[in-house]
Image: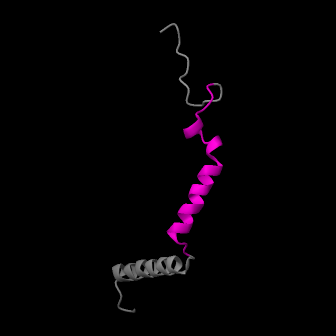
Amino acid sequence: MSGKTPSSSSSVIQAQKLVDQLRLEASMERFKISLTAADLVQYCQEHRCSDPLLVGIAASTNPFKEKKTCMLL
């Protein structure tokens, strides 16, 4: 046997998973927040006419409209 206990081998596996995740995150391309924020503002301005939070939802197509209650109750 190798002399390793089951808990030490599981901690090695956990550490390897963590290292793999950190390597993945470190290799990702990063963008400056100033550029990303400017793109986000531009996108919001271009799509504001179709944003239901700004324009509202027509009563006929509103899926959250109160349902009619039963008159017998």
What predominant SS class does the magenta segment belong to? Answer: helix
**Position of 53 relative to 36 (above/below):** above
Query: In the depicted view, which residue is nearer to us: 26 or 72?
Result: 26
**Position of 28 relative to 38 (above/below):** below
**Position of 70 relative to 18 (above/below):** above
The quadrant of the image that shows the N terminus is: bottom left
The residue that appears at 63% across and 29% down in the rendered structure is: 58
Quadrant in which residue 54 is drawn? top right
Boundaries of the magenta span: 30-59
Query: In the depicted view, which residue is nearer to us: 12 or 53?
Result: 53
Specify the farthest residue to the top.
72
- Residue 40 pos. (x, y %): 57, 58
Q: How many labels sit on residues?
A: 0
The residue that appears at 55% across and 72% down in the rendered structure is: 31
The residue that appears at 61% across and 45% down in the rendered structure is: 48
- Colour scheme shown: one colour
- Residue 35 pos. (x, y %): 56, 67
